[in-house]
Image (cartoon, rainbow, N blue to C red):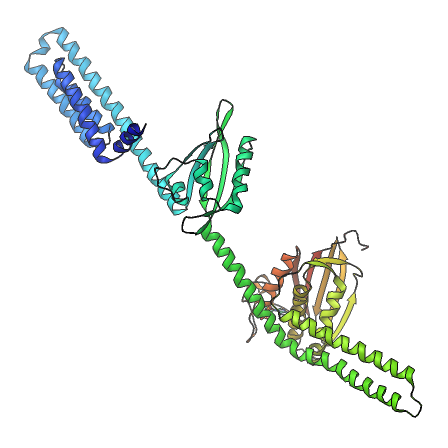
Amino acid sequence: MPIIKRCKKLLSTDAGAWLAAIAVGSMIFITNSWLNLDVAPTLLYITLVFISANVFSISVFLAVAFGCVAVLTASFIANGGYQDEKLIAGFIRCLIALTTITLLALRSKRASDALRRKEAFFMGAQKLSRTGSIGFIIDAPATISWSEESARIFEYPPDVTPTLALIKARTHPDDLYLVDRVIEHATQQANLIEVEHRLVMPDGRIKNVQMIANPLFRHGRRIEYVGAVMDVTLARQSEEALLASQVKLANVSRVTSMGELAASIAHEINQPLAAVITSGESCKRWINRPEPNLEEARRSLDRIIQNACRASQVITCIRALSRQSDVQRKAEVFDDIVSDSLSLMQHDTSNHQVRPHLQLGAPGACVQGDRIQLQQVIINLIINACQAMADVQDRARTLRILTSIQNNEAVLEVADSGTGIAEQVLPSLFDPFFTTKQSGLGMGLSICRSIIEFHGGRIWVSSTVGVGTRFLFAIPLTNPGHPQ
Ligand code: ADP
């Protein structure tokens, strides 16, 4: 077996092909000379051997063929063969044989050249697209074949015979079950096998590969799957990098919103603190009376506790907003998220002389989501609405915030009476970095859309220039069937 392998390898090199052609050619020459056969066909046979070994080109072969016909004709004439009927018939037979051999050789040479060219194109395409071919029959043992590019993806030498053990040796230990699943699907003769798993290279590098295969040939009861293996490492790495930068940007935007929130937060904390001081002083007065009124003092203490709790809640909320915390999805009451967001923005709205109208029309409706992220969306929509109304002088600056339930979705509408948005701008509104503000980042709405889509929902806008804008988003309810 190793000798056959070595011979195959030798024949696939240029020097090997030359050697083989010379050896076979010499054998034909010796045999034909021994049998006293014509020189011309002998020469053509030898050329044929060289051409099939891809040593000669078509033009060399044609030159040899014409040479042979010329030699044959010249010797026919020189020997006066035209005087003998038998020799004429032999000459014609020889000519026909030479022509047939030439035509067949030309056809096969053209076909083999076209095949080699296609193979080169195919290999180039595989290399560029980092896609290899693979074929396998799941049996005991499995028979696997692959292209050079597949061997390169798995980082094995191109002439290695692929085996299941070799594939498994490169597979990430945590993904071995995926390879086993492919074997299982192939055993069950599935119509399509698709898998993506990680490879671990000997130097510890991780690669992501995707394989897709279809059953193509049937060999008795066994089925041969043929498909492609693609190295998708770069695509996965860029997806991960994109996600990481989106997370970073979301954090930048959250911190930017935090700046805007700072004023309203100061106001939110100041109010309960002032109430704590007032209630504390009145408590002191009730106790210092000649006849202390303990009942009133207790009520003052209750107010102190209530207000201190409110201040503490505001601080918890600020902490959560500023922290780059992991996404926490849980069932949340939709209306509570909306009213909490608006109360955080109270100072901001009054600063912009905006009158907010809150209409909660989804009592008890729950959504599965991250409270902080959803608050971030609502706060962003409110900030944008306030900014859009900053220049409005000829009409009331109204901000309507409505919640409702429609088609098993919780819907929020934030409508303002601001400048409105030009129709041609609407399609780019949710694009990252789209802004019409001098100090705008243009990430707010893009992040809002990512967050809403992450929650399985959608966000949209309608606007009339000079009248106002309505932003709406809808996310699925966790308690569908809720009265609408
Ligand atoms: P930024 O606020 O940093 O510009 P956004 O993504 O939040 O980024 O908003 C993008 C653009 O959308 C804004 O620059 C503004 O032109 C427009 N826009 C958003 N909300 C409104 C609104 N309520 N009224 C008018 N224009 C708006």
- Vertically, is 218 above or below 458? above
- Nearest the viewer among 140 and 262 is 140
- Vertically, is 442 above or below 390? above
Which of the image's four quarters has the C terminus?
A: bottom right
What residue is drawn where x is 49% and y is 22%? Answer: 220
In-image side of 154 versus 57 (left or right): right
Q: Quadrant of ligand 1?
A: bottom right
The spot of residue 274 in percent (x, y) is 76, 84
Would residue 120 be seen by someone viewing this image from the given angle? yes
Q: Residue furthest right?
A: 291
Quarter of the rendering containing residue 329:
bottom right
Q: Residue furthest bottom?
A: 290
What is the tally of numbered marks visible in this picture?
Answer: 0
The spot of residue 114 in percent (x, y) is 31, 34
What residue is drawn where x is 73% and y is 82%? Answer: 270
Which of the image's four quarters has the N terminus?
A: top left
The spot of residue 390 in percent (x, y) is 65, 78
Quarter of the rendering containing residue 122:
top left
- Nearest the viewer among 160 and 391 is 160
In-image side of 359 versus 298 (left or right): left
What residue is drawn where x is 71% and y is 81%? Answer: 267
In-image side of 229 versus 16 (left or right): right
What residue is drawn where x is 72% and y is 63%? Answer: 412
- Vertically, is 135 above or below 279? above
Would residue 390 be seen by someone viewing this image from the given angle? no
The spot of residue 347 in percent (x, y) is 71, 78
Quarter of the rendering containing residue 156:
top left
